[in-house]
Image: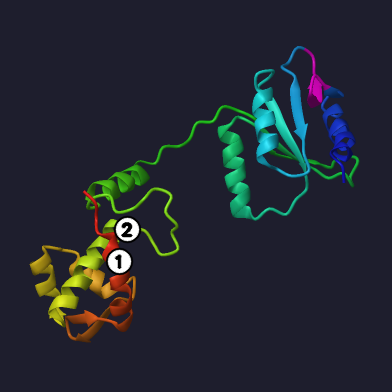
Amino acid sequence: MKESDLYLPLKRFLETQNYEVKGEVQDCDVVAVRGTEAPVVVELKLSLNLNVILQAVERLSLTPKVYIGIPKLRIPNKRRKRIIKLLKMLSLGLLVIDPNRPTGGVTVLLDPGEYRPRKSKVRQERLLGEFTKRVGDPNLGGTEKRKGIMTVYRQQALAIARFLQQQGPTKASNIAQALQEPKARNILYRDVYGWFDRVSLGVYDLSPRGKQEIPLWDGDSATE
């Protein structure tokens, strides 16, 4: 397939909407004009990549009606939503073109328009809460996350684990009092990381996994 294979189905699609369409005008792949309206510009590509996005952004200096046209591709829904969100933020449109259907082979996934993101007060409060409660600055920005990053919750769990490492099996209420950590019981009960074993009613100790993994975090103490 060539990019030019996408042109005729797109041209016919736009002509059904009373546009006059011409290809390769002033470095634009497709230009469509209808009366005194702002022209429509479409950049054609076989795949959606950074180059075509940058080209389309450049075309916004010519008209607010800029689309990217690509062939029908199998894109996972989650990734498609992210792509559409990005293009929406850039005020770009997206067309999917089927070159095997000369007529009716164009689907409009997104029209260009001003982007106004919805603010999420809950997510902002969660972000600032994590920032404020985290002790020091234990993570390098951009760190590989396979091992896991240091969060407030992980710091709390590590404090409990290190207490058990030193004291041995201890009642949850005593741990909460000693560490002044009101969430200690919940952290021990949920055992998100698999670090704790309940050895008797209300009494916890380090699990074999905890004994193995806690030393791996010894070099990750919070920085001031």
Q: Tell us which disc is closer to us: 2 or 1.
A: 1
Which residue lies at the image location 77% right of the left edge and 39% below the top edge?
A: 45
Q: Position of residue 93 (x, y in %)?
A: 67, 33
What is the number of callouts on the image?
2
Of residues 110 and 66, the one nearer the viewer is: 66
Within 10 Å of disc 1 (Cα), the crowding (few <14, some 14-19, many 20+) is: few
Compared with 170, 138 (above or below) is above
Name the amino acid type tagged 1: Trp
Q: Residue furthest top?
A: 36
Residue 174, compared with residue 94, is above or below; it is: below
Which residue is rendered at x = 22% and y = 53% of the image? 135
Q: Residues within 10 Å of mark 2 (few under 14, many from 20)?
A: many
Query: Which residue is at 68% across, 19% downward?
Result: 63
Q: In screen coordinates, is 172 left or right of 220?
A: left
Which residue is labeled 2 in the image? 150
| Horizontal side, residue 215 vs residue 165: left or right | right
Q: Earlier in the sequence, mark 2 or mark 1?
A: 2
Instruction: Report, in whole angstroms, how far the alpha carbon at label 2 lies from the one at label 1.
Output: 9 Å
**Start and end of the magenta stretch?**
25-35
Q: Residue furthest bottom?
A: 200
Task: Tell me if residue 30 is in the magenta stretch.
Answer: yes
Prevalent SS, magenta region: strand
From the top left corner, tell me how far across and down residue 161 is, in percent.
22, 72
Whether residue 90 sits left or right of residue 139 in the image: it is right
Pointer 1 residue:
217
Specify the quadrant of the image occupied by residue 66: top right
Q: Identify the amino acid type marked 2.
A: Met
Per the image, label 2 sits on a secondary structure element best described as loop
Asked if 95 appears above or below 157 in the picture, the reply is: above
Say which quarter of the image contains residue 88: top right
